[in-house]
Amino acid sequence: VSGPLSDLAVHADLTVPEGQLVVEGRADLTGSDPRYRLEGEAREVRLEHLIAGVPGETLVSGGFVIEGAGVGPETAQATLHLDLGRGSFAAHDVRGGSGHLSVRDGVLHVDSLVVRTEAGLITAKGDLGLVEGRRGTLELRANAAALETLQPIFFPDAPFAMAADTGRYRVGGSAQLEARIAGSIHDLEARGRVRATEILFDRVRLRRATVTFAAAGVGTDAFRYEVGFTADSLRAPGRLFATVEGNATYAEAGGQAEIEAHAILPEPQHYRVVSDFRHDGLTATDFDLLEVYARTGAGEWELAEPAGIRVATDGLRVTDLLLRQTDGSGQIRADGHLAWRADSTAADLPAAFRLDLVDGP
């Protein structure tokens, strides 16, 4: 740094274990809001070491130009041009991209943002409020035509190649995302849809699926959401489901979920589950079963009375679960605790969990 405050020359060349950053430019620091024009280049900067929550193996390279005045979201009037080079996100290749953004009067304006990855293309355009009372609308699109390139993320220990014994990947298919985000970063609303075709995930394959979502109050204590999905021709080991449908709503730490499925192989089958749910901090979720129905070749089964299931870090707890055949010929009763590990607090599994199969009412 050299020169007077009214015309300060800036030059920085930082090389650290997290990567290299080179910045050059000039600044005027004499006013209430500093004015500046800076050009820089990042070379293989490892973001996971600099920003909490960023996945490992995330590298950023590329250049930027920022010009304007002010440094906070309330006062900044600035433009930012990005030219992204090759990098990675969670070990997934990023092939480059570009962006033209600006901040004016507490609003982020995204004139264009394009990121090209190995899986496909991500684009964004619109506005978003940065301070309370300022709002905008941002359109986000993603087109992933090669989901098999995501295999290292889901199966990091698997070789990134077709399995020799099956001639296929463990992850595959294509998906398209369309979303609209509105409001400010302090109170966001989001609505969108994901459409997927020929999805493969390990030993599960489906022909087509659609997921719709809507959320409000993101960033506030009044967060709530709705999610719905439909899928057809879902094939799992030993099963072929013609249709699978479900939806869930959530507000104030609890909600309701519903799922229904119709199978055609190995025989016609019908399943339906409806349950309330609520979160107990970050360690457990309680499900209050309201409806359970199953029709298989062995007959029709239904939930006799409301029951509880608690999924926690230490295991699964079932409370008063009673299923009975609709013709009265049998019933299944379950109660107790199943530990995820034999060394957990409920290690004596036979004593902790009881399952009864009874013929007749």
Image: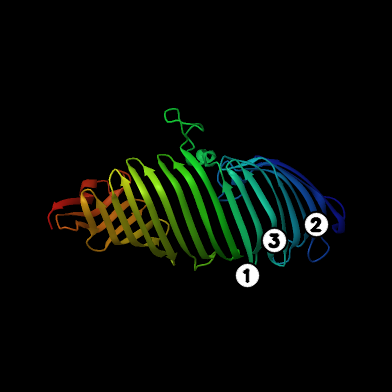
The span from disc 1 to disc 2 (Cα, nearest Å) is: 26 Å
Give the SS element for disc 3.
strand
Percent x, y for residue 166?
42, 31
| In the displayed structure image, the side of residue 157 where residue 262 appears, left or right | left
- Whichever of callouts 2 and 3 sits on the residue coming sooner in the sequence is 2
Using a 10 Å C-alpha cutoff, classify the residue at mark 1 as few (fewer than 14 neighbours), some (14 to 19) or many (20 or more). Answer: few
Give the SS element for disc 1.
loop
Mark 1 — residue? Answer: 132
340 vs 304: above or below: above
| In the displayed structure image, the side of residue 125 where residue 336 appears, left or right | left
Residue in the image at 36% along x and 54% along y? 312
Using a 10 Å C-alpha cutoff, classify the residue at mark 2 as few (fewer than 14 neighbours), some (14 to 19) or many (20 or more). Answer: many
| In the displayed structure image, the side of residue 271 where residue 191 appears, left or right | right
Residue in the image at 57% along x and 65% along y? 188
The span from disc 1 to disc 3 (Cα, nearest Å) is: 16 Å
What's the residue type where badge 2 is placed?
Tyr
355 vs 35: above or below: above
Using a 10 Å C-alpha cutoff, classify the residue at mark 3 as few (fewer than 14 neighbours), some (14 to 19) or many (20 or more). Answer: many
Mark 3 — residue? Answer: 109
Percent x, y for residue 47?
62, 46
Is residue 321 at least partly visible in the picture?
Answer: no
